[in-house]
Image: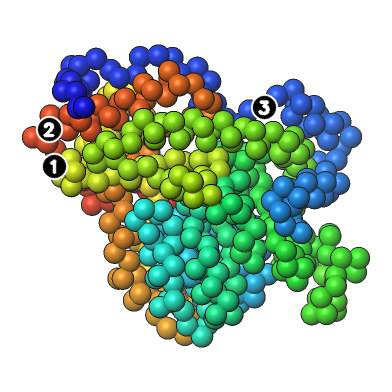
């Protein structure tokens, strides 16, 4: 039953009254993490690879893949994944525009281009139904982003990829430990890459990781950015034997061993910790079940799919159920109730000049089409869901611990505003032309 209550924005009592304590604190760093780091420091092994190799083996076993390769950040891991999948000058990769720079931008350094595909309005992940019409003879890979922790619909994506002989790269930077129909994301496509930076749900410092079951992809990634490890001992692919020991990409992408040390400790407790996060976040959404205008951004219950660590949790906004109230005005009222929230998410990549007109390398034309066989920018006009998404999503609290009494206060703030939305309609200025814009400060 709806309860008419004066909103805090107009002098009413705030919904959130309690001190949240450490419910949002992340990552959890203990003396065990500190001891692991000190061990590396004290023996001067910061630039070695022994701890990193141990972490790679443990991470691969946890991920359910044969191989894992540590990088100094997720962007480098994604670039190496593209290279390892054969992306070269003039080639195309298909990627959702609703994501962070690193999902697509490294293709520029390989002389390739990105073709943007639309997303599903409920998952916010790449829409399998929109992929096939984006494929051309130059398409080398599909980049699947498990956006904001939600697993993408991998079965039809893999079917399309296999039909056309295209590689699938999973960007798992938002979804470490998430499940798709019972299978862990990051072990479904041909290769996966993830950021492991401090703000992520699997946070070990400044680092990234690549995982795969394909030996050739693994060796190519080593050859591209790990030349101190690229030698006759690891090379089995005939195509790489002649260049073994040579720095093919000229990059030094190894993971710093202080991060590796933290990673080994964090991995021991990660499943246990994200189980509590999932319990807390699902409880939040259960409290809001059926509230007009608000939809949970999570897989259906009993689907076998989960949100992993729920990185950058968001909700779906349905303004039609709240008299057309703008998401900007809605979030303003929720903030007044004591909950940090903001409208929108990443500003779609295709709306930035970097994907339309900027000439990064001085080729005399926009870098996105510098070596392309067609002007892929023309396809950007056909992204209806992506273009409208900024007014239909909003951030929610990311609870790291299950504290029902605290979670209930935060959930009540959203319910209170939604059930009293009429108070906000009169002076609603509407949404600005573009809300959100994480591309500027959410690093990978």
Q: Where does residue 270 sit, x and y in percent of width and height? A: 66, 36
Say above or below: 440 vs 266: below
Residue at (41% x, 53% y) in the render: 123
The residue beneath circle 1 is 323
Q: Do the residues labelled 1 and 2 touch (CB within 8 Å)?
A: yes
Number of the label disc, if any, that sits on residue 422 = 2
Q: Where does residue 368 sit, x and y in percent of width and height? A: 46, 72
Q: Where does residue 362 sit, x and y in percent of width and height? A: 50, 72
Furthest residue toward front: 302
Number of the label disc, if any, that sits on residue 29 = 3
Q: How many marks?
A: 3
Comes first in the chain, label 3 or label 1: 3
Q: What element carries label 3?
A: loop
Residue at (51% x, 75% y) in the render: 160
Residue at (37% x, 42% y) in the render: 296
Q: Where does residue 196 sit, x and y in percent of width and height? A: 63, 45
* Camera-nearest residue between 131 and 180: 180
Residue 32 in sight here:
yes
């Amino acid at each position: 039953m709806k309860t008419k209550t004066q909103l805090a924005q107009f002098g009413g009592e705030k919904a959130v009254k309690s001190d949240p304590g450490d419910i949002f604190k992340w990552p959890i760093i203990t003396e065990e993490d500190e001891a692991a780091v000190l061990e590396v420091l004290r023996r001067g092994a910061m630039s070695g690879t022994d701890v990193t190799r141990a972490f790679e083996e443990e991470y691969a076993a946890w991920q359910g893949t044969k191989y894992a390769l540590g990088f100094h950040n997720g962007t480098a891991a994604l670039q190496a994944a593209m290279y390892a999948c054969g992306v070269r000058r003039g080639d195309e990769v298909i990627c959702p525009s609703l994501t962070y720079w690193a999902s697509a931008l490294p293709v520029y350094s390989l002389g390739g281009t990105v073709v943007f595909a639309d997303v599903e309005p409920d998952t916010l992940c790449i829409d399998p139904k929109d992929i096939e019409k984006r494929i051309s003879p130059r398409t080398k890979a599909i980049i699947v982003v498990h956006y904001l922790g939600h697993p993408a619909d991998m079965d039809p994506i893999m079917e399309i990829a296999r039909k056309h002989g295209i590689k699938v790269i999973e960007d798992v930077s938002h979804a470490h430990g998430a499940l798709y129909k019972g299978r862990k994301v990051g072990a479904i496509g041909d290769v996966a890459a993830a950021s492991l930076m401090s703000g992520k749900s699997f946070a070990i410092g400044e680092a990234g990781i690549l995982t795969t079951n394909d030996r050739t992809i693994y060796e190519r990634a080593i050859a591209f950015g790990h030349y101190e490890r690229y030698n006759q001992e690891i090379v089995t692919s005939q195509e790489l034997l002649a260049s073994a020991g040579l720095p093919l990409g000229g990059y030094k992408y190894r993971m710093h061993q202080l991060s590796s040390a933290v990673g080994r400790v964090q991995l021991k407790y990660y499943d246990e910790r994200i189980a509590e996060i999932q319990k807390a976040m699902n409880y939040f959404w259960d409290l809001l079940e059926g509230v007009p205008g608000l939809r949970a951004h999570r897989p259906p219950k009993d689907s076998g799919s989960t949100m992993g660590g729920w990185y950058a949790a968001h909700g779906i906004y349905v303004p039609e159920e709240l008299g057309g109230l703008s998401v900007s005005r809605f979030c303003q009222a929720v903030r007044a109730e004591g909950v940090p929230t903001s409208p929108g998410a990443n500003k779609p990549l295709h709306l930035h000049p970097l994907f339309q007109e900027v000439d990064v390398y001085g080729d005399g034309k926009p870098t996105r089409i510098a070596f392309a066989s067609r002007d892929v920018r023309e396809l950007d006009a056909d992204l209806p869901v992506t273009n409208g998404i900024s007014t239909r999503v909003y951030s929610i609290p990311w609870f790291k611990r299950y504290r029902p009494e605290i979670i209930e206060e935060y959930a009540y703030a959203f319910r209170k505003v939604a059930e009293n939305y009429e108070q906000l309609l009169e002076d609603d200025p509407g949404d600005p032309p573009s809300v959100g814009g994480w591309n500027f400060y959410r690093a990978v």
